[in-house]
Image: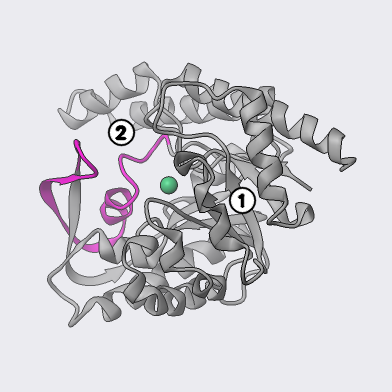
Amino acid sequence: MLETTSVGSFPKPDYLIKARNQFAKGELSPEKLKELELQAIKEVIQMQEEVGIDILVHGEMERGDMTTYFAENWEGFAISSLVRSYGNRYYRKPVVVNPVKRPKPVTVEYYKYAQSLTKKPVKGMMTGPYTMCDWSFNEYYPNREALTLAFAEVIHQEAVDLEKAGARYIQIDEPAISTRPDELDLAIRAMKIVTNGLKAKTISHICYGDFSTIYPRILDLPVDILDLEFANSNFSNLDIFKKPKFTKMISIGVVDVHTHTIEDKETVKQNLKKALQVFDPEKVLVDPDCGLKTRTPEEAKAKLKVIVEAVKEVKQEFGLK
Ligand SMILES: [Zn+2]
C-alpha cells in the first residue's frame, strides 16, 4: 500500500557524461564506458536504498534517449541527424529502413546487474511500441500501424527475457500516447502483444498530454499499473479520474521533474491526500512525475526524499501499513 517508486531515468554523473563524449569521439573503449555505466547504476541503486524507495530503477545510465538507444541496439535502423523535440532538447531520431529485429536482449544484462545489488525489486524498463513508432521516421513499413505492431513483437521478446531473468515489475513507457489520442486503439492493440502471457506486474508511464482526451479509454491498455504525472499541473487533472471510477492500480506523480525547486513535504502530503479521495489507497503507488534525468543528482535525491517522508506520514495518519 502506497509503495514508492522511481519512474526511470536519473541524471548521469559528470564522470559518465565525460566518458560518453570521449567514447563518441573514439577516445574511450566500449569496455571502459560500460564499466563507468555500471558504476553509475550502482550509485543510483544505493541512493534509492538510502532514501527508502520501495521499487527501484537502474537509472538508464547506458541510454542516451529512450528511442535512439533501442534503435542502436536493434536491426532495421539508420539514425538521422539531430532532430529538435520538446523545446530545446535534441535527439537523433531513428529511421526505420528495414524489418525491425532484435538480435539479442538489450536491457537484460543491466537489469540483472542492478537487481544483484539490492533485495528490493528493480523494474525492467523499456520504451513502448507506440512511442517507438511515433518518435521514429518510417521508410520501410506501409503505415504506422504496421510499424507499431512490428515494434510490439520485439518489445514482447525483451519483456519475456526480462521476466525469465527475474523481473517482477516490467515498465513499458508510452509518453507519446496522450499526444495522439486518435491512435489510442492502436497503442492498446500493440500493448496486448507486448504484455501477452507475462506474469510480472506491468506498468506503463504516460506523460506530456491532456489525460482528459484518453480517459477512460486508457483503462483498456493491457497493463496492471498506469503511471501518470499530476504535480506538473498542480493536481488539477485529478478531476478527470473521478468518473467513471479508475479500475487499475495507479502510480501518482507527486513532484514536478521540470523545476529545480524541491517541493515541501506538506504540499506533497496535501496533494497525495487529495488523490486518495479519488483513488483507492490499496491501489496507489507514489513517485515523481517522470524520469529525473534533467535534474542535478542532488535535486533528484531531494525530490525522492520528500516523497518518502510525505508517504510515511500520510500512511501514519490514515492508519495504513
Ligand atoms: Zn515521462
Relative to 277, say whether 220 is above or below.
below
Q: Is residue 159 above or below residue 24?
A: below
Kindly identify which residue carries mark 1. Answer: 251
List the residue tagged with mark 2. 30
In-front residue for pair 134/42: 134
Lateral position of residue 263 relative to residue 273, left or right: left
Mark closer to the observer (1, 2)? 1
Q: Amino acid at mark 2?
A: Pro
Tell me, yes or no, whether the highlighted magenta stretch contains residue 312.
Answer: no
> What residue span does the magenta drawing correspond to?
61-90
Counting from the top left corner in percent of width and height, residue 56 is at 62, 39
Circle 2 crowding by C-alpha within 10 Å: few under 14, some 14–19, many from 20: few
Residue 78 falls inside the magenta stretch: yes
Q: Residue at x 57, y 71 (%)?
A: 219
Image quadrant assignment for residue 33: top left
Question: Of callouts 1 and 2, which one flags the residue occurring earlier in the amino acid sequence?
Answer: 2
- Does the beta carbon at disc 1 come under 8 Å from ligand 1? no
